[in-house]
Amino acid sequence: MPKNEIRTAPTVNDKVRFLARPGTYTPAPPRVEIVETHMSWVFLAGDRVYKFKKPVRCSFLDFSSLEQRKVNCEDELRLNRRLAPDAYLGIRALRQQPDGGLSLDGAGHVVEWLVEMRRLPEDLTLESMIGNGRLTPDDIDRVCDVLVGFYGALPPVGMSATDFIDQFEAEHAQTRTMLVDPNFGLDGPRVTALLDDYSAAFEAARPLLVERVQAGRIVEGHGDLRPEHVFLTEPPAIIDCLEFSRRLRLLDPFEEIAFLGLECARLGADWVFGQLRQRVAEGLDDPVPSVLLSFYWRYRALLRARLALAHLTEPIVRKPNKWRPQARDYAALAEQAELRTRRQEDR
């Protein structure tokens, strides 16, 4: 390249096209599958997975600079190795060579950072195992063993009860605003009843939330413990923690347990939550009141309804017919909170 020639920086589309080619990788896979998420592009290339962050900025994250995306990749690697140490292999540099071409292995300056992972078998996710009817209580016991070891080894987070409770109030204020918006077409009287029930559950749980903080039960957890992130390998691996916000990772382990149980119930495995709560409570020597679990269930169900509707506000809406029905599904689960979280001996 002539000395004074200005090299054109590759666009996001340039990077996607390059990473979509089998010949980009060594060894070259037969094909590359591409998955676009809200914040990332993911490339499934043979037995490897490569992911780079979109250069986006919003209220809860900032990936707008290359350096910020590198820091996030480093955080993703560090945090996810807690629950999937063998899956997260490292960070790779995507470089622009002197001739302007892109390379994963050659010389040149860095134009993107990628997380490299070992590809895990998709048919062994908790979601897939529920869907094909193969999930067993022994599988859930193995997941519980991992979670008990994980939560039991985490140090308590130093935070005030006021700060902890304020997080729920701030998040739910956003949830309320979205659910009552008539543009989303939810049933108004039903939403009003749900929000009233939530407010009552919050007030009942408030002193228990204070007790959880004072007892040192708040830790830096996973943050997004969903069935598609749990792989029933040997040992089980749990990926894709919520790496971009430490604030949203600071939680009570049983909020995550309620969330995972909620998501399993939505997929048709109603029985999973009861086993999760019992085994984790025994493993952590932490019998959590049903009142608190009912609050956590409601909170997460309504939050997930809000996040489903949020997809409809994006400039380009992917799968537009998916989100309203999904929000209604979560609303229905929120209505069932007390029934779902009540201990068997209370029935």
Image (cartoon, helix red, strand yellow):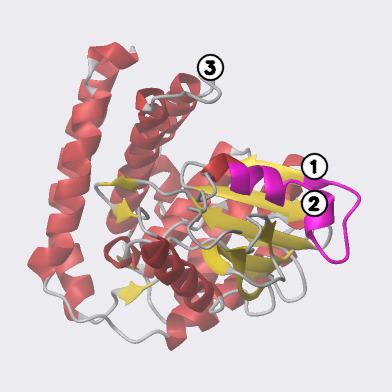
Q: Nearer the viewer, residue 44 or 340?
A: 44
**In the rendered view, does 333 fall on the left or right side of 303?**
right
Q: Do the residues under discs 3 and 1 have CB atoms within 8 angstroms?
A: no
Question: Where residue 132 is drawn, which disc sits there?
Answer: 1
Label 3 or label 1, whichever comes before in sequence order: 1
Q: Residue at x 66, y 70 (%)?
A: 237
As displayed, is residue 239 above or below residue 283? above
Q: Residue at x 84, y 58 (%)?
A: 46
SS class of the residue under badge 3? loop
* Residue position for label 3: 321
Cα–Cα gap, marks 3 and 1 = 24 Å
Q: x, y (%) of residue 223?
A: 41, 61
SS class of the residue under badge 1? loop
Q: x, y (%) of residue 196?
A: 17, 31
Q: Residue at x 37, y 47 (%)?
A: 297
**In the rendered view, does 14 fall on the left or right side of 40?**
right
* Residue position for label 2: 123
SS class of the residue under badge 2? helix
Q: Amino acid at mark 1?
A: Asn
Q: Nearer the viewer, residue 182 or 313?
A: 313
Q: Farthest residue to the left: give it.
A: 162
Label 2 or label 1, whichever comes before in sequence order: 2
